[in-house]
Image: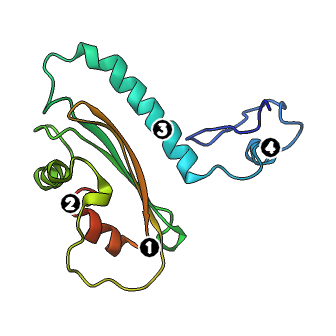
Amino acid sequence: MIGERFLAPFPVTNPGGNICGGREPARFLQKVSGGPLSMSARILAFAALFVSLFLVSGTAQAAPRDHNTALLLEVQYSDVEDNAYKATVLTCGRTDNHPRRAQACASLAATSADLDAMAADDRACTFIYAPVEVSMFGFWRGEPVAEVRTFPNSCVMLAHTGALFDF
């Protein structure tokens, strides 16, 4: 059905027009889509944009970095932590903004960029439920990567992913 699902990774506004039948655009979109846009839908839309930009701009690069590695790392915290959102791009090159680039790249290399294969450290975490969703999209050494995981809280997330999502 046309208009059944509208993916917009940004707030939609209607400056001056009345195409939504007198309703606010956000409420109009919720009515059309059946509810607010999920975080996974926004992440998927943003990742698709990132991957398409990477593919288009990949031909213009002078020299490939670390076997064609470019990963978009995202962390979305729950309502308990004010819905905070963080993202960075990891290329395992010297120009990365990731504060723990060397450790993150080493853990990815040890597990072939598989979040499930990463072993948890021995830290003690609380049982407070404040879900944290992490996602990793892009290319690891030329191979496509698309993973999304949800952890019960940020302590458990850091215990399982180490330096990768610690930015």
Q: Nearer the viewer, residue 97 or 15?
A: 97
Secondary element under disc 1, as helix, strand or loop, is: loop
Distance between the alpha carbons at the discs numbered 4 and 1: 33 Å
Query: Which coloring applies here?
Result: rainbow
Across and down, in percent, residue 106 comes to 12, 52
> What residue sits right under mark 3 in the picture?
46
Marks 1 and 2: CB-CB under 8 Å?
no
Across and down, in percent, residue 129 comes to 48, 79
Distance between the alpha carbons at the discs numbered 1 and 3: 24 Å
> What residue sits right under mark 2 in the picture?
163
Q: Is residue 63 left or right of residue 49?
A: left
At a point 20% along the width and 29% down the height, the residue shown is 68
> What residue sits right under mark 1 in the picture?
152
Q: Is residue 31 above or below residue 165?
A: above
Of callouts 3 and 2, which one flags the residue occurring earlier in the amino acid sequence? 3
Residue type highlighted by circle 4:
Phe
Quadrant of residue 94 in the image? Answer: top left
